[in-house]
Amino acid sequence: MRRALIAANWKMHLGRRDDALRFVRRIRHSVGQIEGAEVVLCPPFTVLPELGEVLRRSAIALGAQNMHWSESGAFTGEIGPSMLSGLCRYVILGHSERRATGSADESDEAINRKVHSALGAGLVPIVCLGETRTQREGGETDAVLRRQVSAALAGLDGAEVGHCVLAYEPIWAIGSGRPATPVEANRTISLSLRGFLAHRFGEAVAREPRVLYGGSVDAGNIEAFMGMPEIDGALVGGASLDPGFVELVRRAAGTRRTAD
């Protein structure tokens, strides 16, 4: 059984040192006592060093919210992989809120370059994938997800694919308060993501990557998602900014232990 993973995407919240430290000190002990789920916090870049110090001997891991594919260069405002490798273990790549800008730095090709660079720096990429409401209503979900995952993982071998985390985030559900149903999300992950991986890399490789669900996940619905066989955790937005996040992690871990 793949180990459950709960990743907290703070987005542009808790970016001030005092606020971030206050929140982490409030939850770290309780989260650290929960067995059965790995937890990673993905705060703004501004507080990664400070949180790294506070969480150095903690069970909580850290991740970044984005990364450039180049080690260095004339890329004003960007963060390279080697800058992150000593600060965190994970990095979110291709989040829909970034893809929506239409920037060349968030194209399918760019995400692939970032994935390669992240793995080369010893980071674990959390690769976000998802369809819009228009694409969903047009019956394009499978085609969109297969295109995105094919592009993101192009050029990787089976071992490298196994080190990646995939996050299925239906764009129409993010921040809407109306998530996909657990059965719906499980079916999409099974057919469009693991199905593609099995076709491209073989069944054994397809079982390796952890796949998260994201999109209006909270403590009230996490158990239903974690009860699905193809869902290994969640990429949590707003619900990760509240002390109730501890309860979300506890319920996720408890559901996975029951499933085991």
Image (cartoon, grey):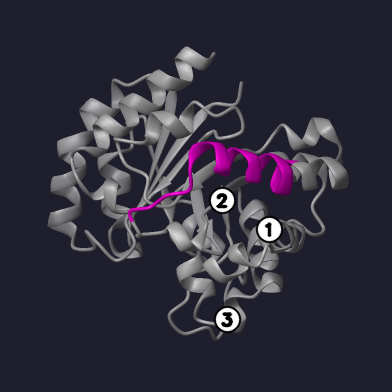
Q: CA distance from mark 1 to mark 2?
A: 9 Å
- Residue at numbered disc 3: 73
Name the image quarter holding the N terminus.
top right
Which three-letter amino acid code belongs to the residue tagged 2? Tyr
Say which quarter of the image contains residue 197.
top right
**Which residue is disc 2 drawn over?**
168
Residue 173, relative to residue 35: is it above or below? Answer: below
Mark 2 vs mark 3: which is more N-terminal?
3
> What secondary structure predominates along the stretch shown in magenta?
helix
Residue type pointed to by label 1: Leu
**Residue 193 shown in magenta:** yes
Residue drawn 50% across the image and 81% down it: 101
Q: CA distance from mark 2 to mark 3?
A: 32 Å
Say few, some or many: other residues with alpha carbon within 10 Å of mark 2 (under 14 / 14 to 19 / 20 or more).
many
> Is residue 170 in view from this perspective?
yes
Decide which of tag 1 and tag 2 comes sooner along the chain. Answer: 1
Q: Is residue 191 magenta?
A: yes
Q: Which residue is found at the position 29% from the left and 46% from the top?
A: 240
**Left/right of residue 256 with respect to residue 142 in the rendered view:** left
Front tag of 2 and 3? 2
Mark 3 Cα within 10 Å, few/some/many (few <14, many 20+)? few
Look at the image and give the residue range highlighted in magenta.
Answer: 177-194
The residues bearing labels 1 and 3 have C-alpha atoms spaced at a distance of 32 Å
Q: Is residue 163 visible?
A: no
Question: For this rendering, which residue is in front, 144 or 100?
Answer: 144
**In the rendered structure, are the residues bearing label 1 and label 2 in contact, judged by CB atoms less than 8 Å apart?**
yes
> How many labels were placed on the picture?
3
Instruction: Identify the element where label 3 is drawn.
Output: loop
Please, what is the three-letter code of the amino acid marked with disc 3?
Answer: Gly
The residue carrying mark 1 is 145
